[in-house]
Amino acid sequence: MSLLVVGSMAFDSIKSPFGEVERVVGGSATYFSLAASYLTPVRLVSVVGKDFPREVIGMLSSRSIDTQGLAIADGKTFHWKGYYEYDLNTAHTVKTELNVFQEFAPVLPEEYRDSPYVFLGNIAPRLQMDILDQVRKPRLVALDTMNYWIENSPGPLREAIGRVDIVVFNESEIREISGEYNLVKAARTVMGWGPSRVVIKRGEYGVLHLSDGTMFAAPAYPLETIFDPTGAGDSFAGGFMGYLASRDGSELSDMDYRLATMYGSAIASFTVEAFSTERLQNLTPEEISERVDAFRTLTEFRV
Ligand code: AMP
């Protein structure tokens, strides 16, 4: 079933201990859509400038990604510049240039309005709410954000969180927004604002998934080669939501959420093996299933 995503499409300039790249294609919606497209059809809502490569838009629409909701505006594409030290779990922002996002007022194409699954990717909370105002009765809405928005737009962000079912944050974000260091307490605080589930991304330590009464912990896949963690969080979210949307509207069980977490973790583990979307755009469904199986073996034990 269709999965709508709103988020950034970007040029990223990134430095990690393993190399440096300038103005490569990135953005939360780009990573999310590619990851989810292995599991379900995606409807993309974003904006790029005239400087964004047409081939990339062509590559997205050659997959099951509907790009009708992608605006091409006069001006420059969003640009994020950041770096990682040996602790690859923490992205340090050097510069955030919103560019065409400053003026963006998304209008959903009519057929997007009935999207049953919605992902409000990392972007201005005002835009996340613009989308929520335009969709009709979605079954499930999830939201992601970043320290930039927690610090620059706290009020609208709290309001947006109050309107969704699931939040997908990394551990520093949930600590910052909740004011709680302990992750279980932080998740309880956020659930008190409305969402019924909290998924905490912990980089190389995996994912912690909490709802009222259930807890699930997934490891990250222990890789030998990691080049660039950028996009891992959005690829995780794409795999996670993509799997839930692929369940064709059936009632979602706790096991569905667990499997969704494993699909997200499997797809994210490929993203970090190369810079930009290079690895993510060249996966096969077999590689993804094999990685999900490898996770099963990794954590299996008997008494
Ligand atoms: P992650 O998956 O969490 O590593 O997110 C990486 C992507 O987030 C990068 O490709 C950036 O272009 C994008 N990004 C960085 N800062 C922001 C921001 N303030 N708003 C929206 N997207 C951002």
Image (cartoon, rainbow, N blue to C red):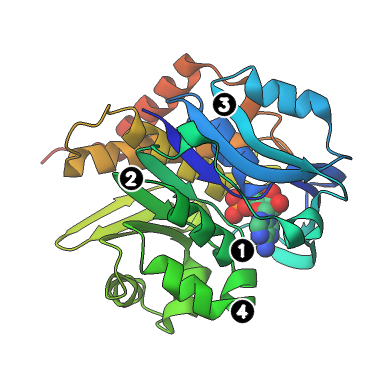
Numbered mark located on residue 151 in the image: 4
Three-letter code, disc 2: Pro
Q: Residues within 10 Å of mark 4 (few under 14, many from 20)?
A: few
Q: Please report whichever mark, 3 or 2, sits nearer to the chain's N-terminal start.
A: 3
Does the image show residue 16? no
Write down which quadrant ligand 1 falls in.
bottom right
Give the residue pinned by disc 2.
Answer: 138
- Pointers 3 and 2 in contact (C-beta within 8 Å): no
Q: Position of residue 236 (x, y in %)?
A: 48, 43
174 or 140, which is in the foreground? 140
Q: Is residue 69 left or right of residue 14?
A: left
Q: Nearer the viewer, mark 4 or mark 2?
A: 2
Q: Is residue 256 among the parts visible in the rendering?
A: yes
Depth check, mark 3 against mark 2: the one in front is 2
> Which quadrant holds the N terminus?
top left
Q: Which residue is mark 3?
A: 65
User: Is 223 displayed left or right of 274 in the figure?
Assistant: left
